[in-house]
Image: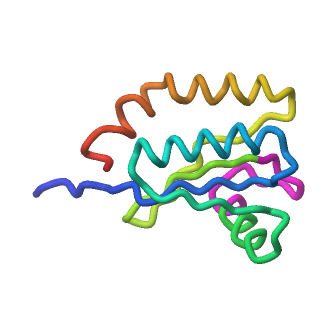
Amino acid sequence: MKARVVTLVRITVVLAPWCPHCVPLSLETTQQMAKELNVELRVLDIDKPDQEKLADTIVQEHGDFVEDYLIPQVFLEFDDGRVQHIFTGFSEGVHVTKARWDDFFASHFYGSELRSPAIK
């Protein structure tokens, strides 16, 4: 039996425009990632009530959820319905969040697994 190829279909970032870890850092980072991976980027702004409900749901079901959860949070969504949480910002300085993004892009997961033909 042939293994099914799972396709990444969307990246979702949960953020707020006033958050320096989110805008511009994580918004620009996820925009570039979506472009490189050729997938849609969905931005959920927790300050917009209709988007806040969706953001709360994805964070509660798949992310790092507490009542006042940290942002940004980033998720990969696949065509088989799977959602994978890949990133949460840090409460320390923006330089810490930037360093963790750098670590993510240098990781085996991003460099090999996520970008492999079997995932796309």
Residue 29 coordinates in the image, percent (x, y): 60, 39
The single residue placed furthest to the bottom in the displayed view is 50
The image quadrant of residue 7 is bottom left
Q: How many labels were placed on the picture?
A: 0
Q: Residue furthest left?
A: 1
For this view, does 63 lie left or right of residue 83?
right
Above or below, 96 against 72 in this view is above
Q: Residue at x 69, y 62 (%)?
A: 44
In this view of the protein, which residue sits in the foreground, 97 or 67?
A: 97
**Residue 6 lies in quadrant:** bottom left
Give the side of residue 83 with respect to residue 94, left or right: left
Q: Quadrant of residue 115?
A: top left
Q: Residue at x 63, y 49 (%)?
A: 74
Task: Work out which quarter of the rendered image holds the N terminus and state it.
Answer: bottom left
Percent position of residue 95, x then y: 78, 23
Q: Find the magenta span and give its range.
A: 59-71
Question: Residue drawn 42% across and 26% down?
Answer: 108
- Measuring 56% from the left and 29% from the top, which residue is drawn there? 104
Residue 58 x %, y %: 66, 63
Q: Nearer the viewer, residue 72 or 4?
A: 72
Q: Is residue 91 above or below residue 50?
A: above
Magenta-drawn stretch, dominant element (helix, strand or loop)? loop
Colour scheme in the image? Answer: rainbow
Magenta span includes 43? no
From the top left corner, tell me how far across and down residue 66 is, in percent. 83, 54
The reply to whether the magenta stretch includes residue 69 is: yes
As displayed, is residue 26 above or below residue 112? below
